[in-house]
Image (cartoon, rainbow, N blue to C red):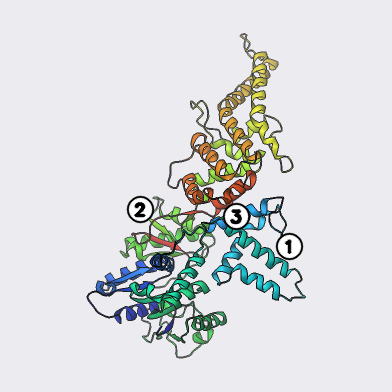
């Protein structure tokens, strides 16, 4: 490796990439590989080369992510590059901890309590990304001497045991860090495996892992750029030293920008995240006055701020003719602000009916879409044993048997059906009462029919007070009976599904039944997104694994809820003419 350059800011990154690409040998059959941390950065580089009129800058240069390079190296080495399935580790840890009868000799963690499965799996992933193995934890346990934390050896022993057992439960598991480490080891044994990559340039993310640094060092790149945030802080200085030590080369700063800012926007680009010492420097460039490139506004609430942001985007697109892909709305927190901005941008009630398409970096939460919200309510109801409140939330989304005048129940109607059927549904202490729903509705239907038979309409009219009260009660009973008759088939299917949960059905068998119930009985708006399909794709490999059989009943439903809440769906495609909405 020739050098490690620390790059701060997008302009400095563009200049560094341009200089390094221009320094590549100008051969007709040039072969080079540029390793980038994200596809968005690759698209930006291609677009900048085209706009600059230098498409030959990328001739013969392949743009790849580190995982793609690692997989290619392993394929050339004849090694089975197993698929990256980090979710299997979570499932395996859940399965190991969910058993009341411990399969592992755990000293610190309690069997039968899988509540920490996600945290344990994330800890294992962090340790693996740092280049550690279960053997390292065993060694640390033997050498551990911490009087202030006497249970630390037990925690390390349990973590190592869970790590080894989880990987054994899922033999097809290959995490991203494991893929990078295997590729680095293969290159260490045979450096010729990287010859086909040609000259290698690498752009490292702001916080590269030890596994990534091992792969980069094994690639022996021509140059490496380390992205660094602003302002410069002590942790970033230590990180720079660690990266330089791992790569075996000193770090140098990219050339500073010496050109004086011409507009207020240039000043913001240069000094927004500068350190206080730089801002206090008396000879630094300062604004001569407002020039229209920067506007500062304060708003009393989120709604007014969103309206102002949408109005600004419409003005940029219509008045200033700014291309949509060059307009960005930056939010401090992705949820729920990104979704609110997208809804306002694409709602055609501003600017004479103008709506602007948007792209959300990282996507939107699946549970925020109608199909995702309905699926989440169903899963929560099943997990709670069809308790009253969650069942009331599900009933308005069920298909009715007679789709005539009443296509679905309202929430008020659902409450009347539930509360009019007596005390029914599971409780935290007795979830088994979920099985009572179908029988209770059948009994209530029979009672209402008997009541209506007794309250026969009187042909002489309803002018007397007692007869008027009877008529009112008859109408209420008729309405409640019609609702119960209409919703009973769906509730019977829901009761059967809840029974499968109570019977501890394993995840590979339970999920197809839940998915089938959603397709047959739930009134789900047409996609995109189709929450059931996206969740099915997310857990397909998990359900096919051996570890999934250890998730049963409510534990399986809890896993589905956790996965659904973490799932996001794409909104727009990066590179299309759309307004960018995302984090800084």
Disc 3 to disc 2: CB gap under 8 Å: no
Q: Residue 92, labelled with which disc?
A: 3
Q: Name the residue at the left extreme.
A: 28
Tell which circle, 3 or 2, labels the residue nearer the N-terminal end: 3
Label 2 belongs to which residue? 354
Q: Secondary structure at mark 1?
A: loop
Quadrant of residue 171 in the image? bottom right
Q: CA distance from mark 3 to mark 1?
A: 18 Å
Q: Is 523 placed above or below 544 here?
A: above
Q: Residues within 10 Å of mark 2 (few under 14, many from 20)?
A: few
Q: Is 26 placed above or below 115 here?
A: below
Q: Residue at x 62, y 59 (%)?
A: 165
Q: Position of residue 573 (x, y in %)?
A: 38, 57
Q: Position of residue 396 (x, y in %)?
A: 56, 36
Q: CA distance from mark 2 to mark 1?
A: 60 Å
Q: Nearer the viewer, residue 517 or 140?
A: 140
Q: Secondary structure at mark 2?
A: loop
Q: Residue at x 35, y 69 (%)?
A: 63
- Decide if residue 215 is on the left or right side of residue 26: right
């Amino acid at each position: 490796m020739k050098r490690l350059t620390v790059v701060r800011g997008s302009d400095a990154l563009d200049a560094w990439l341009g200089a390094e690409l221009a320094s590549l040998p100008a051969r007709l059959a040039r072969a080079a590989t540029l390793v980038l941390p994200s596809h968005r950065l690759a698209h930006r580089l291609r677009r900048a080369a085209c706009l600059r009129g230098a498409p030959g800058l990328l001739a013969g240069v392949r743009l790849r992510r580190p995982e793609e390079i690692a997989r290619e190296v392993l394929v050339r080495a004849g090694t089975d590059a197993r698929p990256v399935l980090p979710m299997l580790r979570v499932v395996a840890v859940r399965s190991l901890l969910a058993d009341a009868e411990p399969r592992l000799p755990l000293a610190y963690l309690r069997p039968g309590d899988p509540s920490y499965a996600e945290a344990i799996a994330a800890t294992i992933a962090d340790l693996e990304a740092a280049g550690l193995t279960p053997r390292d934890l065993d060694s640390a346990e033997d050498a551990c001497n911490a009087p202030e934390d006497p249970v630390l050896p037990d925690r390390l022993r349990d973590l190592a045991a869970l790590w080894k057992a989880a990987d054994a439960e899922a033999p097809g598991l290959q995490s991203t860090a494991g893929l990078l480490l295997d590729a680095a080891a293969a290159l260490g044994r045979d450096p010729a495996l990287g010859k086909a990559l040609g000259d290698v340039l690498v752009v490292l993310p702001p916080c590269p892992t030890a596994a990534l640094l091992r792969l980069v060092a094994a690639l022996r790149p021509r140059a490496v750029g380390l992205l660094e945030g602003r302002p410069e802080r002590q942790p970033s200085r230590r990180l720079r030293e660690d990266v330089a030590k791992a790569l075996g080369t000193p770090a140098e700063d990219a050339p500073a920008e010496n050109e004086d800012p011409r507009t207020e926007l240039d000043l913001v680009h240069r000094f927004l995240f500068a350190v206080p010492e730089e801002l206090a420097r008396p000879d630094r460039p300062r604004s001569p006055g407002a020039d229209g490139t920067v506007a500062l506004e304060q708003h009393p609430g989120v709604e007014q701020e969103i309206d102002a942001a949408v109005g600004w985007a419409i003005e940029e697109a219509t008045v200033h003719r700014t291309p949509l892909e060059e307009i960005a709305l930056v939010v401090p927190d992705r949820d729920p602000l990104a979704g609110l901005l997208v809804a306002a941008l694409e709602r055609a009630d501003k600017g004479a009916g103008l709506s602007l398409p948007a792209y959300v970096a990282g996507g939107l939460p699946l549970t925020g879409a109608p199909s995702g919200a309905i699926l989440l309510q169903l899963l929560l109801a099943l997990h709670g044993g069809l308790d009253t409140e969650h069942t009331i939330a599900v009933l308005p989304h069920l298909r009715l048997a007679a789709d005539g005048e009443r296509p679905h129940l309202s929430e008020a109607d659902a409450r009347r059906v539930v509360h009019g059927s007596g005390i029914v549904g599971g409780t935290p202490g007795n979830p088994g009462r979920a099985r009572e729903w179908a029988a209770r509705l059948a009994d209530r239907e029979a009672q209402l029919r008997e009541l209506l038979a007794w309250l026969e309409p009187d042909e002489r009219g309803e002018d007397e007070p007692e007869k008027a009260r009877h008529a009112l009660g008859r109408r209420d009973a008729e309405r409640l009976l019609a609702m119960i008759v209409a919703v009973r088939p769906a509730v019977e299917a829901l009761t059967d599904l809840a029974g499968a949960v109570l019977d501890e059905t394993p995840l590979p068998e339970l999920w197809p039944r839940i998915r089938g119930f959603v397709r047959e009985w739930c009134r789900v708006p047409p996609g995109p997104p189709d929450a059931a399909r996206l969740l099915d794709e997310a857990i397909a490999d998990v359900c096919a694994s051996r570890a999934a059989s250890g998730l049963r009943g409510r534990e399986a439903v809890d896993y589905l809820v956790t996965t659904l809440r973490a799932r996001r769906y794409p909104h727009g495609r990066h590179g299309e003419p759309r307004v960018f909405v995302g984090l800084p």
